[in-house]
Image (cartoon, grey):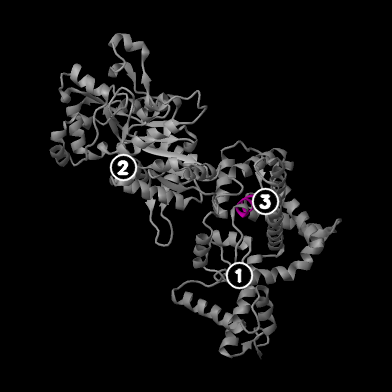
Amino acid sequence: MDLHELLRRHRDEEARLRWEGTFAEYLETVRRQPHVARLSHARLFAMLKAAGVTESEDGPRRLHFFDGHLFGLDETLNQLYDYLESAARRLEVRKRILLLMGPVGGGKSTIVTLLKRGLERFTRTEEGAVYGLKGCPMHEEPLHLIPEPLRPQLSEELGVHIEGSLCPVCRYRLEHELGGDIERFPVERIVFSEAERVGIGTFTPSDEKAQDIAELVGSIDLSTVGQYGTESHPMAYRFDGELNVANRGLMEFVELLKAQTEFLYALLTLSQEQSIKTGRFAMIYADEVVIGHTNEAEYQAFVKNERNEALIDRMILIKVPYNLRLSEEVKIYRKLLAESDLQGVHIAPHTLEVAAMFAILTRLEPPKQPNLTLMKKLRLYDGQPVEGFSERDVRELREAAEREGMTGISPRYVINCLSAAVIKAENGCLGPLAALRALRDGLEHHTGLTKEQRERYLNLIHETRREYDEIAKNEVNRAFVYSFEESARNLFNNYLDNIEAYCNKTKLRDPITEEEREPDEKLMRSIEEQIGISESAKKAFREEILLRLSALARRGQRFDYTSHDRLREAIEKKLFSDMRNVVKITTSTRTPDAEQLKRINEVVRRLCDENGYCPACANELVRYVGQLLGR
């Protein structure tokens, strides 16, 4: 499709959205499509549902509206969904201000921005179509024209809920331009747009001396006062405040609690009475979702002030903590880096993982259990198996650490450091060690850290480095083991044959000599000891493996060495242990001979072909592991 065709289609789409008619025609539209008369909360909720919602029995539901944009905030987004569902049913919560509270860089403003952009797109669809009185500065619902005595009957007939009254401008026009004939009042389709100030408003606090309440509720149009003779004439007032333009849509308050008291009082009336009060007019009805966001320090200071009790009572608080799942944190960095121009730069495997590991460690509270380290806690939160702990333990850990995720290093800081490291990347490749160095060096310039925090974060970088050392050794060990999968499978089958004979108290037949022999206890123990299976526990472990094999066989499923997490770990460790001396000698030799060089080149090739490394970072990994093993 060429550019001219794209432009033509865009013009056709814009023309389709420019519908105009009379109120009588709009009533017929409502009769056919009652959803066009939704209130603001119901519209926002319908938008989320239209994007798709996947319910889960054992966890939070998944809101597809946020897919690819937000990661690790399932609980927060589910609370938002629950609030909007209740508000969409016109329960009392719709008369509350939604306050998102959390640390900087946690995603508060991103949530609101996504909702605003989503509303703009949704109102361009038939499902999200919105109509307003033409010429109304607040693009209000045309059903406001219906007189109060007729509303019960028409509500039942049309299947819609009618609430609210005409704004001063529309009331004046109805009486003086249309002679009270509501059926002739012009109606148009409207599309929400923050740029054009339709259906979406945004307010940001600034200097108290320079900012006026008019930014929220509009002001007198002095140029027309002479024409209309009085400042209280509806046509002599500009209803262009943020609360006016956000009518029927969404109003965002950036850093809400930093706003002047006068501005916050305006929200009291809007939230409880759904009305805007201006100096020269009666209450003006407004239907809008009000979302503010703030940080924890501002919120705590606000709550402690007794003068704010009335406003606090009209707020619903949703915490937006930092993500605590390793895999989700990696997705955040991938998304942010994908938005940049990184042509020619290779991100080595585990680079984003170690950066995410450090960031999440700074956000976790030290576990109280003596057998649980911070790194194990990180793995548990990510859904990884940790011996001795279950899903129930994870829930208890989360409940015991209420403020977890409200402090620590933000994704913004990590991306800043990674961005600086990318520019300095040697050979066009950014690796895990360079990422950790950038994170460490960045702490020296982090103005918001105390000396104690900086020391703690440096210790966590060292802990992350130790974890990466194990990852690096495993990567190289895997690459060194010739036909790793085949070797693991052979060792696994040999182990199975021996434990089956052991448990059934039978003998094995040698495949070559056909002689009968006892199960190879030495082989079985050499595998089991890799994961700490004691002499007294070996029988139970072997029986557990056979039970798992039998259960899968009954369901027609195949059992291999990856089917049991602990057995997989034992098999891999055994293979790595057998190869350790070969790996150590080969990688740590400064001047490898021809055979060693061939082996190193084979390892590098495998790392590149199977693990996503480039030649530069693969060679660096092999050299680094050689240094580790040579210590």
Lower position in the chain sequence, tag 2 or tag 1:
2
Q: Nearer the viewer, mark 2 or mark 1?
A: 2
Image point (62%, 87%), residue name: 508
Q: Nearer the viewer, mark 3 or mark 2?
A: 2
Question: Residue 265: in sight, yes or no?
Answer: yes
Q: Is residue 462 left or right of residue 2?
A: right
Three-letter amino acid code at disc 3? Tyr
**Label 1, label 3: how far apart the Cα atoms are:** 24 Å
Residue 416 screen position, x and y as percent: 64, 40
Which residue does the numbered mark 1 point to in the structure image? 568
Please identify the quadrant where the N terminus is shown.
Answer: top left
Q: Which mark is residue 613?
A: 3
Image point (63%, 38%), residue name: 342
Q: Is residue 333 left or right of residue 248?
A: right
Which residue does the numbered mark 2 point to in the structure image? 42
Residue 109 screen position, x and y as percent: 49, 39
- Judged by its main secondary structure, the magenta piece is helix
Categorize mark 3 by other alpha carbons within 10 Å: few (<14), some (14-19), many (20+).
many
Residue 444 position by quadrant: top right
Camera-side residue of 264 and 435: 264
The image shows residue 34, relative to residue 472, as above or below, that is above
Magenta-span inclusion, residue 40: no
Q: Nearer the viewer, mark 1 or mark 3?
A: 1
Categorize mark 1 by other alpha carbons within 10 Å: few (<14), some (14-19), many (20+).
some
Three-letter amino acid code at disc 2? Ala
Image point (44%, 40%), residue name: 307
**Label 3, label 2: how far apart the Cα atoms are:** 49 Å
Lower position in the chain sequence, tag 1 or tag 3:
1
- Report the magenta residues as a range: 355-361
Magenta-span inclusion, residue 356: yes
Residue 491 screen position, x and y as percent: 65, 74
